[in-house]
Amino acid sequence: MLIVGAGGIGSPVARILVDAGVRGIAVADDDVVALENLHRQVLFDDRDLGRRKVDVLAERLPVEAIPVRVDRRNGRSLLRGRACVIDGTDSFADKYLLNDLCLELSVPFVHAGAAQFRGQVLLVRPGGPCLRCLLPEPPDARTDECRVTGIFGPAAGLVAALAAGEALRAISGDPAPSALLLADLATGRLQRARLPPDPLCPCAAGAPAGR
């Protein structure tokens, strides 16, 4: 299993899965612990500032540290053969890249994202529906980063718990249909919405989704 991103979503996902008995977890991230992120990155504290996140996680949890950013050059080799890939990134470009590569490699993928008080999670199985069925192209890059929109710390924690649950469903072979999970801590609402495959999306035909 591979978690991409070791921040406010990825690091608690790792902790939840380890506590659930999952082994063989790897975490990929090239970033370091920063003070402005500690409110939502609860596995780190001020003693870890400036250190690579994956190194800290590997000291505290039985996970493999992969200190790189997953991109088009290394993505296939890092994702191929994984039982599941979990999205802990904060960039739409990275989320869509992981979605596309997982479809291409027939690897289950858990998309997870949070901004302000809201979050969403989607389990993407081989053949879809996928992230591009929800939105065919990534949103405007100007709204792409956590530093632009901000994140309420508990929203990241809730999304992490939901993402870990969907990952456990994926690796356990649970046949229940995938659905889009939507959480809003401003209103206290948690919704589960059916996401039908888009017939125009490459995932519906089982083809690579990259565009």
Image (cartoon, helix red, strand yellow):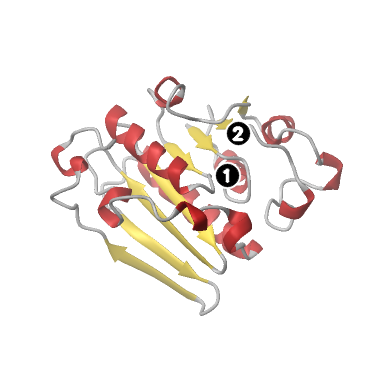
- Amino acid tagged 1: Gly
Q: Position of residue 153 (x, y in %)?
A: 65, 62
Above/below status of 157 relative to 131: below
- Tell me which corner region of the image, top left, top right, bottom left or bottom right, holds residue 48: top right
Residue, far right: 47
State the residue at coordinates (71%, 30%): 55
Q: Alpha-carbon neighbours of circle 2 within 10 Å: few (<14), some, or many (≥20)?
A: many
Is residue 177 something that shows in the picture? no
- Tell me the quadrant of the picture where the C terminus can be found: top left
Labelled pair 2, 1 in contact (Cβ < 8 Å): yes
x then y, percent, for residue 9: 57, 50
Residue drawn at (47%, 29%) of the image: 71
Q: Which mark, by number, is residue 47? A: none
Looking at this view, is 179 or 17 the one in front?
A: 179
In this orientation, which residue lies closer to the viewer: 54 or 166? 54
Of labels 2 and 1, earlier in sequence is 1
- Spatial distance from mark 2 to mark 1, Cα to Cα? 10 Å
| Badge 1 element | helix
> Which residue bears the numbered disc 2?
29
On residue 10, the disc is 1
